[in-house]
Image: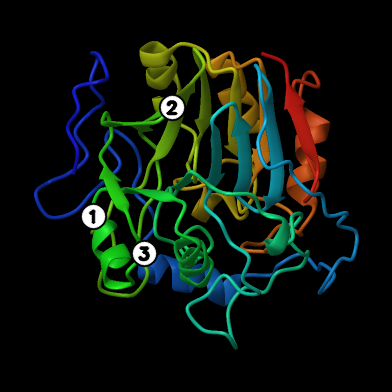
Amino acid sequence: MIHTGATSEPRFPKHYDGKLFYNPDARQAPGLLVALRWKLASRPEPSPSFISDVGQSIPPPRVEGSALRTTLVNHSTVLLQQRGSNILTDPIWSERASPLAWIGPRRRRKPGVAWEHLPRIDAVLISHNHYDHLDLPTLRRLAARGDSTFIVPAGAGRLFRSENIKPARELDWGESLPLPGFTIHCVPALHFSSRGIFDRNMTLWCGYMIECQDRFVYFAGDTAFGRHFGQIREQFGSPRLALLPIGAYEPRWFMSPVHMAPEEAVRAHEILATKTSIAIHHGTFQLSDESIDAPKKQLIACRQHESFLVLNNGQFADIPG
C-alpha cells in the first residue's frame, strides 16, 4: 500500500480489525444465510431478456482545454476524459457478471462503447472485487494494451498480481496516488467484498476522488447511504461531478446496508453539494428484485432538479468547467 501523506485531516474512521475490513459506525452487509433467505423468497420484477436500444458512441482519443467529457459505457463503467487523462471506472464488457460463462447475471444491454473504439486508458479505478465491478476478462484485455495503471482497494493487489494485470497500485481510505496530470484519492464506501465463500471482507471496498485541473470528480463505487458523504465533502469540498449508484436496491430489508435506493442517491447528491451527478449501477444487469429500468424511472420521479443526470449506455455529457 501507498502512504503519500497527500490528504489532510480529518482522517477517515478505522475500518480494519487486523484481519477483516468492516463498515465503521454502520450496519454490516447481510451474511450468507440471510442472502439465502432472500434468494429463496425473491420474486424479481420481470424484465426483457435483452433490450436493443443502445446507441453506441465513439469517444475522442483525448479532450483538451477545460473539457470534462463523461461517457456511460454500462453499469458502473464510465469513461472520464479530461485534459491529459482518460480514466475508466469498474470496467466490464463481459456477457455475464460472474466467474462462470454459463451462469450468473447476463447483460440485458450492450456496452455503449464498442471495445475497438475505446481510447487509450491512463488509469483504471476498481472500487471492490465483486464480479460486476472487477471483471477479469475485461481487465486482462486492458492490461494487454499496456497503457494503464490499475488502482485497486487495499488487499486486491494480490489478485491482480496473480493474473499478471499490472501495474496495480493498492490504496486504503485516506491514501492518494499522484499520476502525471492528476491525483487519485481513495475515500470510504459502505459495502463489502467477496469473490467466493471464504474470502469475505478480506479486501477493501472504496470510492475515489479524482483531482485534475483544480477540480474534483467523485466516483462512489458501490455504497449504501451513510455519513461518509459528509466526511468526503468536508475533506475535499464539493465535487464538480459525482458518479452515484442507484440500482440493485430491492428488497430494502436486505439491500439497504450495501446499496442506495434512488431517493438516497438524491440525498447524497445534496449532501455533497455537487454541481452535477450522473447515475451509475443501473440498466445493464438485473442484480436484485427491481426491474432493469426501475432505478432510472424512480430517480427521475424523485430528483428535485435536472442536475442529477440519467444517461443511457453510450450517452455522454460534457460537464462545464
| 107, 86: nearer the viewer | 86
Using the image, determine if residue 197 lies above or below residue 245: below
In this rendering, would 152 be left or right of 259?
left
| 250, 151: nearer the viewer | 151
Residue at left offset 50%, top offset 62%: 145
Label 3, on which residue?
165
**Residue 241 point in image, percent of width and height:** 61, 23
**Residue 192 point in image, percent of width and height:** 36, 53
In this rendering, would 258 be left or right of 70?
left
Label 1, on which residue?
155
**The C terminus: image quadrant:** top right
Q: Residues within 10 Å of mark 2 (few under 14, many from 20)?
A: some
Q: Earlier in the sequence, mark 2 or mark 1?
A: 1
Using the image, determine if residue 136 lies above or below residue 6: below
Residue 182's tag is: 2
Query: For the residues carrying marks 2 and 1, which lies nearer the camera in this image?
Result: 2
SS for dot 3: loop
Q: Residues within 10 Å of mark 1 (few under 14, many from 20)?
A: many
Name the amino acid type tagged 1. Answer: Gly
The quadrant in which residue 289 appears is bottom right
Query: For the residues carrying marks 1 and 3, which lies nearer the camera in this image?
Result: 3
Residue at left offset 65%, top offset 15%: 275
Q: Is residue 65 visible?
A: yes
Q: Is residue 264 visible?
A: no
Name the amino acid type tagged 2. Answer: Phe
Residue at left offset 32%, top offset 69%: 164
SS for dot 2: strand
Label 1 to label 3, Cα distance in Å? Answer: 15 Å
Q: Earlier in the sequence, mark 1 or mark 3?
A: 1
Label 2 to label 1, Cα distance in Å? Answer: 23 Å
| 211, 101: nearer the viewer | 211
SS for dot 1: loop
